[in-house]
Amino acid sequence: MLSLDFVFFYVHSGLLIRRSENNFNYLLPGMRQGDSEHQPQVLLVGEHSQVLNVILHTVYGLPCGHFNPTNDMLGAAVAGLHAYGVQPNVHPALGTPLFALLAARTPRAPLFIYTLAAQFNFYDLAEHASGFLLGITPPSISEECAQRMGPVYLHRLLGLQTRRVEAMKKILRRPPSRHPPMDCCSAESQAGLARAWMLAAAYLIWEARPGKSKPRYSACVMLTFMTELTTTSMEVTFDNVATSIQCDGCKAVYRERLAQALSSWDLQKVCLAFGSAGDDSLFFCLQRTI
């Protein structure tokens, strides 16, 4: 194969035929699988050598990260794999070298990776990238990215954030229960405990809103992003409120309720979910992390 910048690649045409559903975009028409290896040919391929290098490494199931391709090259390679009819279980399926490379690039360019995955309907990669896009806002998504994502994945991405906040509201909306009456702690004091809990909960929910971290974008590459709210940050917020609690009984029910909330948040993650086969309906779920 000869790339656009005149770099030769020596490959097995029989392997390309087996891995492609369209004879490598019809560059290999009429070649029989049994004798293709004995009839060397030079095929001009309309790809830059660095892009073609990623494509061929993927076809052979080999890693190519050591060549350090840029994100644009990876995007062009994925588009090329699609054009050359490479079977979906080869690129970039979960467990393949290309998937691992794209997943490793996700923290620095989650919007780019999500858009790429959405464009070619790579669900596993899109789900992975979505976890890094919790701080994104609709105005931050360019028209180009939205068009490449398509309505299904765009809706999933925006709905993901809404569901995340709703999940947090559900976990935190119940204040600590009241302990039995005590001479040193009146009903009014216990009502103050509930107000303190709701104050901390309101702060966390406010901070979890999409776009609170004001991320910056360039084209489809996200430069900064809001990370997932951790149980540690939740605990610190509630502990700051708890410093004003004097009653030992209130402290006990407060810590018990906080432990329940932290456990619930730690065991849940907001995820994208497909409908049944052939059904494009959108829905989201809270999935228990095993």
Image: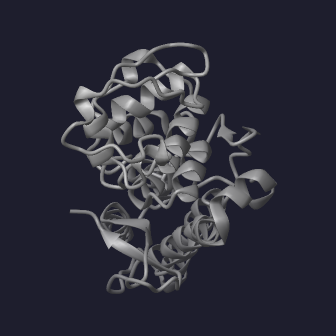
Image quarter of residue 122: bottom left
Q: Name the one closer to the observer, 35 or 273.
A: 35
Say which quadrant the N terminus sits in.
top left
Camera-nearest residue between 108 and 86: 86
Horizontal side of residue 37 vs 120, given as left or right:
left
Q: Is residue 186 left or right of residue 162?
A: left
Q: Residue at x 51, y 79 (%)?
A: 173
Please say if 187 is above or below 35.
below
Q: Is residue 105 visible?
A: yes
| Residue 216 vertical position relative to residue 186 in the rendered view, above or below | above
Give x and y (percent) for residue 76: 58, 37
Counting from the top left corner in percent of width and height, residue 118 is at 55, 58
Q: Is residue 48 above or below residue 17?
A: above
Q: How many marks?
A: 0
Q: Return the x and y of residue 120 as percentages of the image width and height.
A: 52, 57
Q: Residue at x 55, y 45 (%)?
A: 79
Taking depth in this image into account, of 98 and 237 the one nearest to the observer is: 98
For the question of whether residue 211 can be seen, the reply is no
In the image, is 155 to the left or to the right of 269?
Answer: right
Q: Quadrant of the C terminus?
A: bottom left
Q: Nearer the viewer, residue 93 or 159?
A: 93
Residue located at (38% from left, 57% from top):
124
Q: Is residue 80 above or below residue 89?
A: above
The answer to whether residue 213 is left or right of residue 57 is right
- Figure quadrant of residue 32: top left
Image location (x, y in percent) of residue 254? 38, 68
User: How are the colours assigned in the image?
Assistant: one colour
Residue at image location 44% in from the left, 38% down from the top: 102
